[in-house]
Amino acid sequence: MYQAERWDPLELRWRGQRYQPQTVVRQARVEAIDLVERTISWRLLGNPHVNGEHHLSALGHMVLDRGLEPEATRTYVDIRISIGDIVDFAVHDEDISALWLHVYYAHAERRSAYAQDLRMQKSDALFAARTSPGRRAEHHISESVLRPAGHVTQALHRPEKDGTFRFVIDYAVTDRRHETSDLQCELCHRVFEVKTRLRDRHRRVSHSRSRPFETENRPNNYHVFFYRHWHKYEVLSNRDIDAFIRDRQVSYGHAEVDAWADVGDLGGRKPPALELSDYRCAAHDE
Ligand SMILES: [Zn+2]
């Protein structure tokens, strides 16, 4: 169903510091991550009897994309990897030098047409690193936050029955470089935009002079902020966010092509995080 990425030696040398000609890449499923003991446990794909555990401090640094600073593998695991992810290991003499999210492809026959459409090319590895935590957060918010409030939503990317979560780039999806997709309730049609924060507590929404928050977001929809490091979330109404932006005349920030406004931090009183009763699905009311 999926086409797996092929690795060439150049690509490997680029990623792992300790590249050797004998280096091999293996795919494994992450079984456990212990951030106190700083270990990661895995089970080999295709040969599930082979498993292992590695100390994160023994892993090196990786380059995610040209022009970017190398990132410590343990930081990469800390903020981007979850149990059930499929990762690639670079193995040399039984030793692992680096690991990263494995990228699967769907509809590979449309790859060349796709590449022509892309305005800005970042590596698939970087795309996976930045996007996978957000995909997982969307599924979590859909199941654990919105469902208890009566909303029926489905994240675009979902784990398999056993919890395996493959990072797939589908060339038949034309907006593959969008980091997230909104969750829309099938019953009340409210839209929830999930914003994942990897290691800070900022509430940050898309906002620029050419695309101000108020014109891009309907007031009776919502933003959900997921703070991955703390495993916490907050639901805010777009109406409250817009009022905050107007009151404070917040400054614009930007990086690459994104522009944003900060609307406080986790736990801030303005704008207030909503209680479940404030965002429950109105479709159940008679
Ligand atoms: Zn609903």
Image (tube, rainbow, N blue to C red):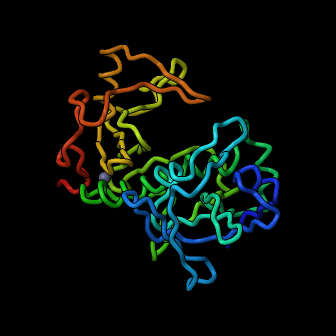
Closer to us: 114 or 263: 263
Percent from the top left, x then y, of residue 281? 25, 52
Percent from the top left, x then y, of residue 240? 28, 29
Which residue is painted at 26% across and 54% down in the image?
Answer: 283
Percent from the top left, x then y, of residue 36? 36, 58
Quadrant for the N terminus, please: bottom right
In this picture, residue 8 sits left or right of residue 102: right
Quarter assignment of residue 201 = top left
Q: Is residue 267 above or below residue 233?
A: above
In this picture, residue 32 sits left or right of residue 230: right
Quadrant for the C terminus, please: bottom left
Residue 242 shows up from this direction: yes
In this picture, residue 18 sits left or right of residue 161: right
Percent from the top left, x then y, of residue 106? 68, 64
Closer to us: 14 or 112: 14
Which residue is painted at 61% across and 29% down in the image?
Answer: 257
Q: Is residue 276 above or below residue 56?
A: above
In this picture, residue 216 sits left or right of residue 241: right
